[in-house]
Image: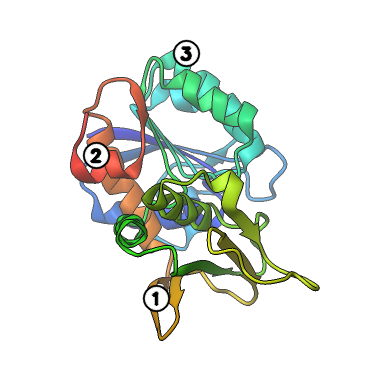
Amino acid sequence: MIKLAIVGAAGRMGCSLIRDLASFREYSLVAAIDRPDIPVLGEDSGTHAGTRPTGVPITADLKAAIQAADAVIDFSFHTSVPATAELVREFRRPFLVGTTALDATERAAVEAAAEVAPVLLAANMSLGINVLSELVKRAAELLPRGYDIEIVEMHHRHKKDAPSGTAMTLAEAAADGRKSNLADVACYGRHGITGERDTETIAIHSLRGGDVVGDHTVIFAADGERIELCHKASSRQCFSSGALRAMLRLVALKPGLYNMNDILHGTR
């Protein structure tokens, strides 16, 4: 039985993880962590998530939570990640990070934890999205430069970062397939007189509205035909169940920084 701590437990993904735990006999929830200023602090984490009570209240005691756990899943806010990563490093706990929009300093904290513990860092834990990423890379390898690459993502109105981490992962996959440096070829939306499209460009467009969980489409467009590779998430369960499945593999790995491709293929 893996004693699990969830950081960001009061948020949308934290609640989805807690609801999904009922389907995994391998886990025991021992800690549900969130910010000290949220109004639901002290509430039963299961009740808050809309499922049966877990007996585990939502608290802000991060150190005690990680110390008590065998493994840690973080779906919090990017500025909170370094504090969790530092404690993961101290207690050498397997660490799954689904939080997106990490800056260089925040990512460095995660990488430091990976020196002493197995760490999975992925923008999207959905198995379908990670298969899509492989398909995008392969398509970019096979198709000539005459196929323009456009990526469109849409999320709910509350999402704070753009483009989504998943869209950037798909753009990186396309760039890898073309053996390009994404920083050199990326285009983020268009406005005004932009001129003709550069065939090297990989364009990323972000839409926000309603309660959309996550839609991602990668378009390869040429004269006379168009290929569209698409993934639509209808609930967060695909992300939470993917994360819980990934953690089952992560706990058996040696220290290091892993991605979902490593988990899917059992590499290293």
Where in the figure is residue 19, as x and y percent of width and height? 38, 57
Q: Which element type, helix, strand or loop, lies under badge 2?
A: helix
Tag 3 or tag 1, which sits nearer the N-term?
3
Identify the residue under disc 1.
228
Coordinates of residue 77 in the picture (x, y in percent): 62, 43
* Mark 2 or mark 3, earlier in chain: 3
x and y, in percent, of residue 129 in the image: 36, 60
On the rendered structure, is 155 left or right of 50?
Answer: right
Residue 237, above or below 98: below
Q: Work out whether mark 1 precedes mark 2 in sequence or the reverse, and give the earlier one.
A: 1
- Colouring scheme, one of rainbow, by chain, secondary structure, one colour: rainbow
Q: CA distance from mark 1 to mark 3?
A: 45 Å
Amino acid type shown at disc 2: Leu
Mark-to-mark CA distance, 2 and 3: 21 Å
- The residue tagged 2 is 248
Residue linked to disc 3: 90
Q: Secondary structure at mark 3?
A: helix
Q: Is residue 234 visible?
A: yes
**Residue type, mark 1 in image:** Glu
Question: Which residue: 29% across, 44% down?
Answer: 261
User: The C terminus is located in which quarter?
Assistant: top left
Contact between marks 1 and 3 (CB within 8 A): the answer is no
Give 202 or 63, whichever is nearer the viewer: 202
- In the figure, residue 122 lies in which quadrant? top left
Q: Nearer the viewer, mark 1 or mark 2?
A: 1
Of labels 1 and 3, the one closer to you: 1
